[in-house]
Image (cartoon, grey):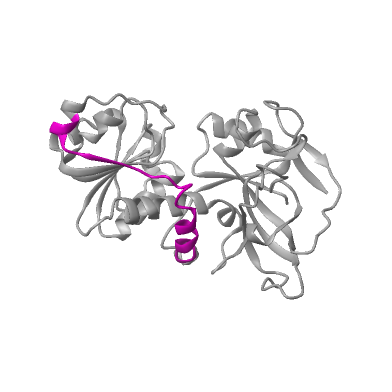
Amino acid sequence: MRAVRFHDWGAAPVLDEVPEPVRAPGEVLVQVTAGGVSHLDVTVASGDFELKPSLPYVGGVEGAGTVLEADADSDLAPGTQVVLRGGGLGLLRDGTWTERISVTRKAVTPLDAPLPPAVAASFFVPATTAYVALHDVARIGQDENVVVVGAAGAVGAMVAQQALAAGARVTGVVGRADQLADMPKGVEAVTLDDAEALAQDRAASLLVDTLGGSGLVGRSRWVRRGGRAVVIGYVAGPHVELDLPSWLLDEVALFPVNMIRQERRAREVSGDLVRRLSEGELSLAVAEFDLAEASAALDALRGGRVRGRAVLLPG
């Protein structure tokens, strides 16, 4: 059986032949159909993360597959399409970058509707983050004017789609001109370099920012007074300087989205999001790689060359 393993911290992964998994009581044996490749995988592989699997370890903190075998009294029949997530996958134990895996029951979630394997393996974080940011944190209302920064990314694109579905007017801000064509239908798209008009008009009632960094406060001034800015990520940098007198005059509330604390809520809303993805109401761009291309997938992710999410397909 093939699996992609890290043998040293900070080193490239290697495609290895490994023993077949043996299912223990209470576990579920799964045929992996896709393994997600995320920034968390990159962080764990660096060796700088607090949680460290024992070397060598199989990467992949999330994935998708079909059930091969479970306990006789389990609700998971063979052939059930499932999402693999949690239970220490890729963090405390071997992850999803493999052909087959035996995992604890709590790491297996059956899908409420069928999805392509690549989407099933990678939808959870962007789709649920977008939902929580818009509905639980920002409490989006009708006829809102929403600006999404980083709208070409997986999370940003999902925020834009769900904001449109909620009845908002949506402006998507992207980093490069070649990303303008990737915006969902109905989104007004501009580049960061051409976003000066947003600061002049201050027509937005809500900003959803996936970039963070030192420019966050400046972008919050695209929002009218009394509006709010929801911060999801910090790919542009983890630090921001806040001048309190100016911030008080701007009168724009800053809200953080902490999906670690929102994990239970994310699982609650995931079923409806699966249905919407299955029916085509929502879409997710996915870049597919073979298991043998794991190192290339990680390099593409680090270099910002992945449109949407990346997955490894066992084949």
Residue 242 x, y percent position in the rendering = 26, 26
Q: Is residue 77 above or below residue 144?
A: below
Q: Tell whether 249 sits left or right of 69.
A: left
Residue that protrudes farthest toward the right in the picture: 19
Please name whichever residue, 5 or 178, is drawn nearer the observer in this view of the structure: 5
- Residue name at image x 59 percent, y 53 percent: 121
| Range shown magenta | 247-272
Decide whether residue 309 is among the magenta residues.
no
Q: Is residue 307 above or below residue 184?
A: above
Residue 235 x, y percent position in the rendering = 44, 32
Decide whether residue 252 is among the magenta residues.
yes
Residue 74 x, y percent position in the rendering = 70, 72
Residue that protrudes farthest toward the bottom in the picture: 73
| Total labels drawn | 0
Q: Tell whether 201 sits left or right of 117.
A: left
Quadrant of the rendered image containing residue 290: top right
Q: Can residue 184 be seen? A: no
Q: Can residue 3 be seen? A: yes
Please name whichever residue, 203 or 72, is drawn nearer the observer in this view of the structure: 72
Please name whichever residue, 189 or 267, is drawn nearer the observer in this view of the structure: 267
Quadrant of the rendered image containing residue 164: bottom left
- Residue name at image x 57 percent, y 33 percent: 300
- Residue name at image x 77 percent, y 74 percent: 72
Q: Tell whether 3 sits left or right of 162.
A: right
Quadrant of the rendered image containing residue 60: top right
